[in-house]
Every structure is written in C-alpha cells, then in structure tokens.
Image: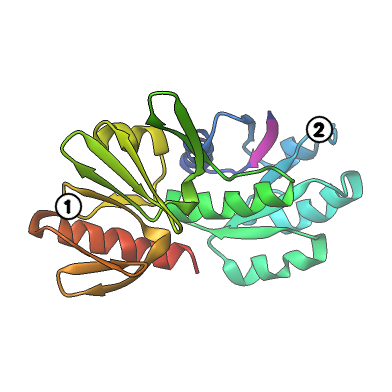
Amino acid sequence: MYRVAIVEDEVAERENLAENLARYSGMFEIRMFPSAVEFLTDYKPVFDIVFMDIDMPYLDGMTAAHRLRELDADVCLIFVTNMAKFALKGYEVSAFDFIVKPVSYPAFSLKLDRILRHLGVRTDKSVLIQSGRDKLLRVAVADILYVEVMGHKIVYHLPDQKVLSYGTLKSVEDAIDDKFFVRCNNCYLINLRHVVAIEGNYVKVGDERLLMSAPRKSSFEQALADFLCTSK
C-alpha cells in the first residue's frame, strides 16, 4: 500500500485526482488536504507521493514545496497545476514531475506509470492463458500484438508465436483489463502500443494488416490518436 497526499484547495480537483488513483489501482491510501497550511501543520514524513497544487490561497504550492523539502527530502513530489510555466521551476524543490489541469485519466495513468517505476514498483501486467487442457502460459500484456477470435477459439498473436485458447473476446478484455487494447472490429482486439500505421480501412500491426469495420473505425482511430498524444 502506498500513501498518497493530495494538496488541493478545489474540491472537484481533489476528488478527480482521488478517483483517478482509485481507477488505476487499489494500492493507494489517500489523504486529502484543502490547503498547504493544513498539510504542513505537524507534518510527518509518512507519504510516498504528494500531489501539490501550485495556485492555492494563504500558502502557494511552490513555497509549500520548499518547506516540505526541509521536512522530507525523499517524498515523490508531483505538481498539479494550470500554470505549467511555474511547474517548470520544480527542479528547485526536486519535483519528480508535473500534471497540467484539467487532469484526464489517460495522461494521468501514464504519469503514474513513471512515478511507480521511480518508486521501484513493477507496473508490467501479465495474463494467464490456458492454451491446452493442462497447459498454462503467463504472458506480459504489453507483449501481445493483438487477439483474434474465430468462433469459440481465441488466438493471442505474440511477436514470436501464436497461442491458441478458447473463450470470447469479452472474456479476454476482462482478463487483460488494459485501456490500450481496443477493438477495430468484432474479431480483433488490438494493442495500440504495436500499431504501425493506418492504411485506409486497415490498421497495420507489426507486419499484418487488419480490417477495421465501418461501425468501429472512427472510435478506433480516436482511441489511437488519444494514445499517441498521451504517450509523447
């Protein structure tokens, strides 16, 4: 369990950050503070991560961060602000990163991936595939190129092999539980990490071209565009 402090004077922003953390994982114990003054009063270095707003009344986040570093040199400090130019001064207080408001989950989750890697937490997810009556194979989710359904058969396309299993595409989606896996039609669930190009009505994944259905083409292309923006 990782202890997280959210220091933010706006109720909606505090709750949004807390919801995004809960959506990402249940590994966080969250405390919320409506002001930097309240946060620093009787401060004890018990937090792993601090999300700090910059524009707050009474004591702004940058000044509070300087005070925080006097009390706690190790906590991972993240500025959350609509004033990105001020967040760039974060090097003065050894801030790890900053997030620009309004905070959206795709961008937030990518930032949190980096934060947890910085804290030494493995964020690689894996899925257990039953590829035979007595054979189970554990595969890293990020390594899956795409998943194909043929009747009741499921084929996991990996960089160096194909793994046959049984089930439905919905059951695969539930097992993988990864926002970067998106359907381009009713037969293919594609890992956006491995998309090479869009060519007309086809999406190129590795060396293969997969057809996008008319009903799903627009939403798939939008999901890919969102992914490319948030992964920069």
Identify the residue at image location x=83%, y=56%: 66
State the mark number for residue 185.
1
In the picture provided, is 17 more to the left or to the right than 162? right
Tag in front: 1 or 2:
1
Q: In this picture, is 22 found above or below 226?
A: above
- What's under tag 1, amino acid-wise? Asn
The residue to which callout 2 is attached is 46
Q: Which residues are magenta?
A: 2-6
Give whichever of discs 1 and 2 has the lower sequence position.
Answer: 2
Horizontal and vertical percent position of residue 207? 34, 70
Identify the residue at image location x=70%, y=44%: 50
Identify the residue at image location x=51%, y=51%: 108
Horizontal and vertical percent position of residue 111? 57, 54
Identify the residue at image location x=24%, y=58%: 220
* Res 151 → quadrant: top left
Q: Tell me if residue 222 is in the magenta stretch.
A: no
Horizontal and vertical percent position of residue 24? 50, 39
- What's under tag 2, amino acid-wise? Val
Q: Is residue 104 visible?
A: no
Q: Tell me if residue 4 is in the magenta stretch.
A: yes
In the picture provided, is 159 more to the left or to the right than 174? right
Badge 2 marks a residue whose secondary structure is: loop
- Report the residue that reaches farthest toward the left: 214
**Nearest the eye: 193 or 89:** 193
